[in-house]
Image (tube, rainbow, N blue to C red):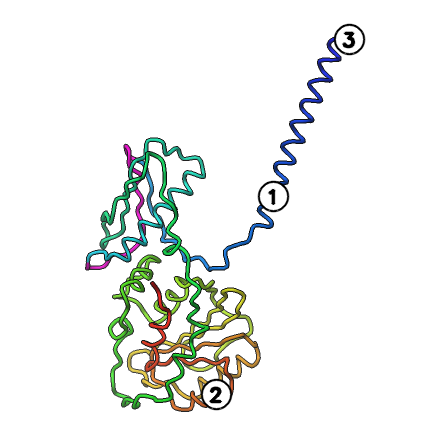
Amino acid sequence: MTVVAIIVLVVIVIAMAALLVIVVKSFGQSAQRSVAPESPLPQRPAPLVTDFHVKGDTARTLFAVPLGDAPAGDHLTDLLCANAVEYVRTKKADGLPLDGIHHIEVSAMRGDDPEVVCTIDLPDPGELPDPRLNILVELEHDPIAHVASVVADTTVSTTPSAAETLEPVAEFIELSAPTEAHLRSIGLDPAEMSLDDLVVGLLRVSGYEVSVGRTGFSLSSDEKASIYGLRRTGQNTVLAVIEHEAGSYPELDEHIFSEFAVSVAQTNPDVAILVTDKYGPYAMYEREKRDNRLVFITRERLQAFVDSFGIT
């Protein structure tokens, strides 16, 4: 065998050995990923980033989050700061060099103008602090699973007269500081929210996957209903939201509840929730007793429903 042939053979053997090492390592990593348990806790949605750039020793992150008229409170500030760190972490994973970064500046929207909410000083240049899981990951509390506490009250408010004007949701619902902060983080201004905004927003920040529409489920009444499908930890829930329209009768007609119950019987979800800012007739309690999948959140129950989310 010539010297050249020996050299070629050695090179081939080395190349095959290197390839084998790479394949084994790759297989081991893939196997590790496949068996690594996923977090059982639903993730909260991250605020939308509309601008990111690095200037000098500072990474600047701008969120599409409405601050409203009041100063940003502690809850919203903590929420935005935690998410800004994680956004920069994704940029680092994508190859952004952080060696010269000492600070992360976090901004949100005050009307049409950006406003700095906080500045994070990194422990060391390019070193990001640990994720704040208590803020970024939803806790085990499931408001739908605990909705029985909302429907336990068997009393109902006195039905208002047909001429009575109902206050909009943004005026009569009270939000805790953490709840307001999380709603703002997904771009919702509580001062201008509709019932639909409120309900869908609460579900999203509580880790629910919300999809528009539900196959086979409909309400054929004159009331305009928004239908959603909800999923979280394997539970299949259908949601209908009916908003009061100015000038319409302030109590939801009993036949709406009947239609809702029929659709539930046909589609067989785990839970079915109807939310309205109208008042409810007493007959709705009888329907809830007959089918424990049915949950009716009418105006007199709406504040308790919001409170039951227990957002911190």
Q: Earlier in the sequence, mark 3 or mark 1?
A: 3
Vertical comparison of 295 with 70: above or below: below
The span shown in magenta is 55-70
Tag of residue 30: 1
The residue carrying mark 2 is 289
Vertical comparison of 48 with 174: above or below: above
Q: Earlier in the sequence, mark 2 or mark 3?
A: 3
Quarter of the image with the N terminus is top right
Circle 2: element type: helix
**Residue neighbourhood size for the residue with mark 2, other residues' Cα within 10 Å, grouped as few (<14), some (14–19), many (≥20):** few
Residue at 19%, 59% in the rendered image? 70
Residue at 34%, 88% in the rendered image? 156
Q: Earlier in the sequence, mark 2 or mark 1?
A: 1
Vertical comparison of 175 with 18: above or below: below
Q: Is residue 51 left or right of residue 72?
A: right
The answer to which of 285 and 142 lies nearer the viewer is 142
Question: Mark 1 and mark 2 in contact (Cβ < 8 Å)?
Answer: no
**Residue neighbourhood size for the residue with mark 3, other residues' Cα within 10 Å, grouped as few (<14), some (14–19), many (≥20):** few
Mark 2 or 1, which is nearer the eye?
A: 1
Circle 3: element type: loop
The Cα atoms of the two marked residues, 2 and 3, are separated by 92 Å
The residue carrying mark 3 is 2
Position of residue 87 measured from the top left corner of the image (x, y, whole percent): 38, 45
Position of residue 110 measured from the top left corner of the image (x, y, whole percent): 22, 53
Q: Please, what is the three-letter code of the amino acid marked with disc 2? A: Lys
Q: Please, what is the three-letter code of the amino acid marked with disc 1? A: Ser
In which quarter of the view is residue 23 placed? top right
The Cα atoms of the two marked residues, 3 and 1, are separated by 42 Å
Position of residue 228 measured from the top left corner of the image (x, y, whole percent): 46, 69
Circle 1: element type: helix
